[in-house]
Structures are given as C-alpha cells and as structure tokens.
Amino acid sequence: MVLRQNFVKKSLINSVGHILRCLLISTVSISWSFYEHSCSHKSIEKAIRTDDPIDLPIKIAEAKAAAIIEQLKNNNITTEKLILTADQVVLFEQTIREKPLNDEEALQFLSSYSGKSVSTVSAIVITHYPTGLQYSGFDIATIHWKTIPSDIVEKVVAKKEIFNCAGGFRIEDEDLQPLIHSIDGSFDSVLGLPIKLTVNLLVEVLSYLDINDDLIHTEEEEEVFEDRDSFQV
C-alpha cells in the first residue's frame, strides 16, 4: 500500500485492545500507536443495543471512534490521524453472544458449542481525524467444533481468559485448538481483526483523501468537523 505511506506510518491510532490483534497489525507492515481513551470499552459496549448481529459491532466500533475523537478534541490535538476501531460479537443459533458475564455463563456458552458451529461477526471502522470521514465493514467466520468434554470446558473457564472474548471462547487456547473441526473463513477474522478487510478499508480511506485532498483541507479551515454526516461513507 503506497497511498499516503508516510501519513499512515506516523498517524494510525489503534484502539483494538486484544494483544493478538496488535500483533496482526504488525504483520501488514503498518506502524501504529495504541490510544487509551478515558471511556472504557465495556461501558460503550453495554450502552449500545440492537438485535442485528452485523449492525451491533459496527455501531460499537463507531462509538469507540467517537470517544477517541472527543478526547483528541479535548486535548486540542489537531494533527491529521487515522483511527482504527473494532468490535466483535458471536452468533450462535441465531442468538447474539458477547463476552460472558460470569463463570456460570462462560460454562454454559462453551458447553453449548460442543459438536456444533458458531460464527464470529467482526466489524472494522476506519475514521479520519479531524474530518470525520469514516469507512466501515464486517467479516463473518464460522468455527465448527468437535465434541468439547466437560473437563476441558471447566479447565478453559478456570483460566479466566475467555471473559475478554465475545462468545466465551479463544481458538488460540491450547486446550480448545485440538477440538476445532474446521473454520470457514480466516483465522484473523475469528481473532477479531480481519486483515484483508482492514487493509481494504485503509486503502479506500486513503484513496478518498488523496482524490479530495484540496477539498478536505479547505473545509477543515472552515471548521466543518461537526458536520460529520457530510463525510460519512
């Protein structure tokens, strides 16, 4: 990707908290910085509700971007940036599942996948600051499980790692990996950061910015950032 290469290297903000997603970003040779905003992801996630398994993670990722933008403005930061935010939900038998709330729910979630299939819906949002230009997309992957023994369920839940995972499972868990029959879709999509989608969205945003560079900077001078809908794509 050569569009605005220097700009991307210096100005991509990654608000994706999972360490594996951070490692995935490094695999596509894009330099980035992690931005910790004052509003917790958990409060953002719980504030947004919808029964649409595609709309929900997109709206949450958009809200995460809005929280970062607000903090950038409050800190009087005006330099041009790209903001990458993401969210993921799990769809199991037409029911949306997010992160398990407690041990009981975690046990119930993981046990229910035994011998069945579960899908991850991962949303990516790229936002340009300060214009508010925003591109979003989603990717779906499906994990087909073998039988998951009850002792493995209990062992995995006891590690507490799955409480940070939508649907209450981690395909990279050493005890769960042998129990995966197959995956329809990419491994990185299941982890929550579909690389192909992310790069495509970055290219789309950078292409738009390059084509409309004069227009965007003219309007920035007129302080039209608040009219974000005019830039929404």
Image (cartoon, grey):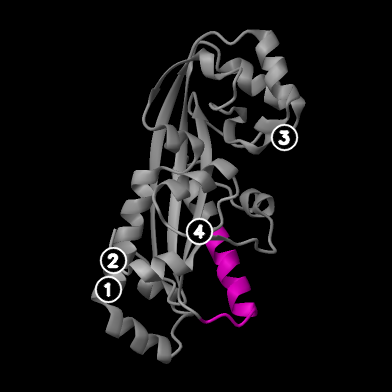
Residue named by callout 2? 3
Q: Earlier in the sequence, mark 4 or mark 2?
A: 2
Label 4, residues with CA under 10 Å away: few <14, some 14-19, many ≥20: many
Q: Nearer the viewer, residue 25 or 82?
A: 25
Q: For residue 12: magenta?
A: no
Left or right relative to 132: residue 148: right
Q: Position of residue 142 (x, y in %)?
A: 42, 26
Q: For residue 65: magenta?
A: yes
Q: Position of residue 176 (x, y in %)?
A: 57, 18
Callouts 2 and 1 close, C-beta under 8 Å: yes
Callouts 1 and 4 close, C-beta under 8 Å: no
Label 3, residues with CA under 10 Å away: few <14, some 14-19, many ≥20: few
Tell me which amino acid carries mark 4.
Answer: Glu
Tell me which amino acid carries mark 2.
Answer: Leu
Q: Is residue 55 above or below residue 108?
A: below
Observer-side mark, 4 or 2, equals 2
Q: Is residue 102 above or below residue 219?
A: above
Measure the C-alpha gap from mark 4 to mark 3. Answer: 23 Å
Observer-side mark, 3 or 1, equals 1
The part of the chain drawn in magenta is 64-78
Residue named by callout 3? 101
Magenta residues: mostly which secondary structure? Answer: helix
Residue named by callout 1? 210
Measure the C-alpha gap from mark 2 to mark 1. Answer: 8 Å
